[in-house]
Image (spheres, helix red, strand yellow):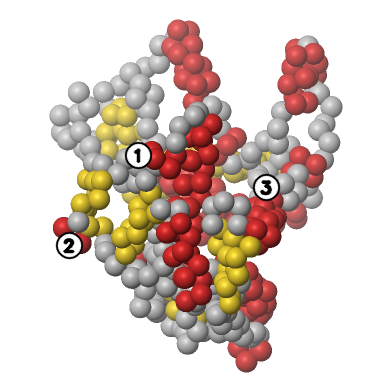
Amino acid sequence: GIELALSMQHRLKGELAKVGKDGDRLLKMVLVSRSKSVLPTHSKAVSRIFTRILKERDVKLLFGVSVVEAKEEVLVLTGGIMQPFDECVWCTQGCAQSWIKDSGFDVDANGFLQVDTHMESTNSPGVFAAGDVASILGHPRPKAGVFAVFAGKPLASNLRSAVLGVQKRRYLDYFPQKTFLGLIGTGDGCAVASKGTMALESKWLWELKDWIDRKWMWTYTGGLPDMEDMMPPPPPPNEVARAAGPEAIKMLEEVPMRCGGCGAKVGATTLTQALKRLELYRPLPDRSEVLVGLKAPDDCALVRVGGVVGLHTVDFFRGFYEDPFVFGKIAANHALSDCHAMAGTAVSALAVVVLPFALESKVEDTLVQLMAGATDGLREANCALVGGHTCEGKELALGFAINGTVEDPFGAAGAG
């Protein structure tokens, strides 16, 4: 919060100066915190430095209080203190998600998943966690990225050992360091180094911090491999594209890497326009049993037959994952998700499978792996696979038509 407040103050004063306004007179910063001192988790030397900086920058400190209520342009604090504001920015510490405790895992006093020095859950063998989500029993540490980084290698080793059935005595231990280097910006091109009892303020520390931060962010942006460079060269344009002329060929050459999953679906605008044109050609039959259909589409169609509302949906993917088992499970779960989204119960599934031409033994093996993964997903939903259709094609593809039931959303009176 202190780093954010100082950075905002410096930037805003600079922006006001650009338009000829006095930032010292117009801008007032207030820092509200439950803590009773400045940066209590750091050394006293660091706290003294920032207490001085905040005083020099005329930042008002309201410490040892909590925000009881946030109203329009005013904070209500403990003790009845009213703090007005024009803009309020919240800066909170990391908190554990409630699902961790709800899942039955051992947790620490703050709700974080409790692990041993192997980074394995203390009450759920085979469950590993590292980084902010976890706390190592007997080694409490603040939530800082340095601990997650150093936990990476032993965690990877222990995960491999668990998969291979290696005895736990051969797992690697991770003992987090007791002190670590923290670089805290002062907002004006300087920074303070904090490690143990050490504290140092300097401009070159900001340059170091800036370099470290930019290098880290670069690994997730410019440092990532170029996916387009990894793709094989595109095939030559087919007869249809050549017949359509140079515009079609240029579009194919410039098209980005295509998604094989949800992103491969035809856009909603294109689909809507096509259905409208279809109606102009010849209106589709309209039946009273159809409660939800193409006129007001949703995740699934709803059809009432004999007092029961049937739920129907279809989903289809071309192969986008090299493991057929995993791809099969993804395809089944994705088809089932539409049913779940409408609070329905899946009853039966029909599969549509496209298999690339290959030796019969290879085709059979691929089909077995696909459907083994798919039936795993269907089994979890208690949905029966009742049939389907298979054919050969240029590339692997799999889809499911899901049929189920749902409580009548319109009642006996129908959809109106």
Give the x, y percent position of residue 326.
Answer: 60, 56
Residue beneath disc 2: 79
Q: What amino acid does circle 2 point to?
A: Gly
Give the x, y percent position of residue 256.
Answer: 70, 32
The circle drawn on residue 311 is 1
Q: Are marks 2 and 3 in contact (CB under 8 Å)?
A: no
Q: What amino acid does circle 3 point to?
A: Thr
The circle drawn on residue 244 is none
169 relative to 33 in the view: left or right: right
Pointer 3 local density, CA inside 10 Å: few below 14, some 14–19, many at least 20: few
103 relative to 253 in the view: left or right: left
Residue 341 visible in the snapshot: no
Instruction: Give the quarter of the image for residue 162.
Output: bottom right
Choose the circle earlier in sequence order: 1 or 2: 2
Q: Is mark 3 on a helix, strand or loop?
A: loop
The circle drawn on residue 221 is 3
Q: What amino acid does circle 1 point to?
A: Leu
Write the residue at 65% across / 55% down.
210
Nearest to viewer (mark 3 / mark 1) = 3
Pointer 1 local density, CA inside 10 Å: few below 14, some 14–19, many at least 20: many
